[in-house]
Amino acid sequence: MHENKYAIVSDARDPRFLTLRSLQTWQGRTRTGLYLIEGIRHVARAAEQHDLIDSVFLDASVLSNPFGQKLARRLRQRGVPGVRLSPLLYRNLTLAVEPQGIGAVVRQQWIPLARVREVRKSFWLAVESIESPGNLGTIIRTAEASGVTGILLLDSDCDPHDPAAVRASMGSLFSQKLTRCTAHEFGDWARSSGVTIVGSSPTGLLNYKALRYRWPAALVIGSERHGLSEHILEISDFTVRIPMRGTCDSINAAVATGVLLFEMTSQRRGE
């Protein structure tokens, strides 16, 4: 196979492996603008995007899936750099219970807020202080499924490229328009662009189904533990709640995001 031409790395002190390991950390991802993905599905989706993959890493001993092998050959033929890792080193780079033998280093894709333009009936998601990377990845996946225009991240610690977030996104990360900004910058952008801000809160004034959403609109989801910041609550045009039954007073942030996004997209389509 063509991927066998990649050099073999078996020493944990090899600079090529240390570079890969550094991308498991927030500091390494921030410094380089790169991040790791692992698994056939993720690599295949990334390969669909032009010039998104920076390099690949393989474990030929477990890369037995015919499609995965073909994908590795195709990337090698395209001139994508790569290495073959020993099984032990490959294991150190994956969260998968059963690794599939192929991973990649991918370039982060950020859109500056100044380039984010609202359009008629555009539909945005803003995320503030989600603590769980798994929740964030699930939210990104749900955003793609509901057809959001783009995702604005309002907290510097909210990292969509954390390995757990990437894994939970199931490849949706590659197709999303991501923008990093502060809550104040977000408020200024929404006001100048005529975007309605809809805050989500257990104490929101409106049942989420009772609100007739105005477009363009941006739904804001807050921290699992603390909810939305005071600033976001102040600048929200509306705050909505999801009514609870029984003794439960809240639901998982990713689940709540899905409920709200699909209600909004249903209204946007007039369904």
Image: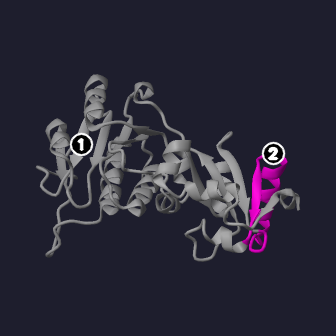
Q: Nearer the viewer, residue 48 or 72?
A: 72
Compared with 171, 86 (above or below) is below
Report if the CB atoms under discs 2 and 1 are less than 8 Å apart: no
On the picture, is 202 further left or further right than 28? left
Judged from the image, the secondary structure of the residue bearing numbered disc 1 is: strand
Task: Give the Cα distance between marks 2 and 1.
Answer: 45 Å
Residue wearing tag 1: 198
Q: Amino acid at mark 1?
A: Val
Q: In the rendering, which numbered label is found on residue 78?
A: 2
Name the image quarter holding residue 199: top left
Q: Quadrant of residue 119?
A: top left
Q: Secondary structure at mark 2?
A: loop
Q: Residue at x 44, y 53 (%)?
A: 140
Relative to 195, is 233 above or below?
Answer: below
- Range shown magenta: 60-86
Tell me if 155 is positioned left or right of 74 in this view. Answer: left
Q: Residue at x 63, y 72 (%)?
A: 91
**Relative image position of residue 220 (x, y in whole percent):** 28, 45
Outermost top residue: 192
User: What residue type is disc 2 on?
Assistant: Arg
Going from N to C along the chain, the mark reached first, 2 or 1, is: 2
Q: Nearer the viewer, mark 2 or mark 1?
A: 2
Label 1 environment density (alpha carbons within 10 Å; few <14, some 14–19, many ≥20): many
Q: Is residue 271 among the parts visible in the rendering?
A: no
From the top left corner, tell me how far across and down residue 61 is, in percent. Answer: 78, 74
Left or right, 13 with respect to 116, comes to right
Quick check: can you spot residue 136? yes
